[in-house]
Image (spheres, grey):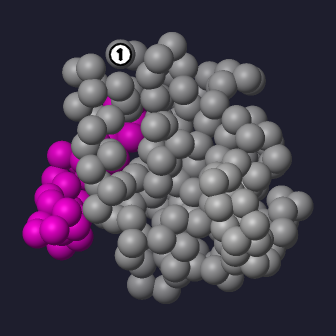
């Protein structure tokens, strides 16, 4: 399907997947939108050796560019939970509680049947625990109904990443065999929005 990623609809559901990388690893960002029964990729980029504050500012700029408003629970930002400093800083900038670990514990102990993610825009995803499920979920969405995801050809590195993605034992991604694995690692959490 041909679509224009520069056309952003005001009242659609959107998600952002962030794979923070600093130093030797790129910082992956993927932004999706739900339009006409399809997940459309609006942005897919890797930022080489970024500075911490620049990526906070870049994330906020992208949110503004794509019409994602904090505390608008029709849009969600999923961040690799291995980067708590980045999550706290982003939450602080967006007006959410930076002590998210305490907030999660509060919901889990006082409201065990309630989905605590419903009260947050920025949601930590722990790859160490959830990598298998995220990989299986991405595969399922890619195959569902002969394809539920539209990717514009301008995102050729994401397409290459998907084509080269290799699963090794126990449902893990083989990062050495997968091209642009940081982009793929941002793609997987962005899809968590679509269950």
Q: Is residue 128 visible?
A: yes
Q: Residue at x 53, y 42 (%)?
A: 193
Q: Secondary structure at mark 1?
A: loop
Which stretch did the figure color magenta?
Answer: 152-180
Left or right: where 142 falls relative to 41: left
Residue 174 percent across, percent down from the top left: 18, 68
Magenta span contains residue 7: no
How packed is label 1: few (under 14 Cα within 10 Å), some, or many (20 or more)?
Answer: few
- In the image shown, does 118 or 191 lie closer to the viewer? 118
Q: Name the spot of residue 7 as percent of width and height, x first.
A: 62, 22
Residue 158, x across and y down, in percent: 34, 47
Who is closer to the viewer here, 109 or 52? Answer: 109
Residue 104 position, x and y percent, is: 70, 69
Q: Is residue 134 above or below residue 138?
A: below
> Mark 1 sits on what residue?
1
Q: Is residue 154 left or right of residue 82?
A: left
Image quadrant holding the N terminus, namely top left
159 falls in the magenta region: yes
Q: Is residue 30 visible?
A: no
Q: Residue at x 82, y 47 (%)?
A: 71
Labels in figure, total: 1
Considering every residue shown, the one lying at the far bottom of the view is 23
Q: What residue is drawn where x is 80% and y is 74%? A: 98
């Amino acid at each position: 399907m041909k679509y224009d990623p520069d056309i952003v609809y005001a009242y659609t559901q959107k998600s952002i997947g962030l794979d923070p990388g600093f130093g030797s690893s790129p910082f992956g960002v993927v932004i999706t939108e739900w339009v006409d029964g399809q997940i459309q990729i609006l942005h897919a980029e890797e930022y080489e050796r970024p500075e911490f504050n620049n990526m906070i500012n870049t994330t906020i700029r992208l949110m503004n560019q794509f019409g994602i408003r904090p505390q608008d629970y029709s849009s969600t930002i999923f961040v690799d939970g291995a980067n708590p400093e980045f999550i706290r800083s982003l939450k602080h900038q967006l007006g959410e509680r930076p002590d998210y670990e305490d907030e999660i514990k509060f919901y889990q102990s006082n409201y065990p049947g309630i989905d605590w993610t419903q009260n947050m825009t920025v949601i930590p995803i722990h790859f160490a625990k959830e990598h298998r499920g995220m990989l299986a979920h991405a595969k399922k969405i890619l195959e569902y109904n002969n394809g539920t995801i539209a990717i514009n050809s301008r995102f050729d590195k994401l397409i290459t990443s998907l084509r080269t993605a290799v699963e090794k034992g126990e449902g893990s991604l083989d990062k050495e065999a997968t091209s642009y694995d940081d982009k793929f690692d941002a793609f997987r959490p962005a899809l968590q929005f679509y269950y």
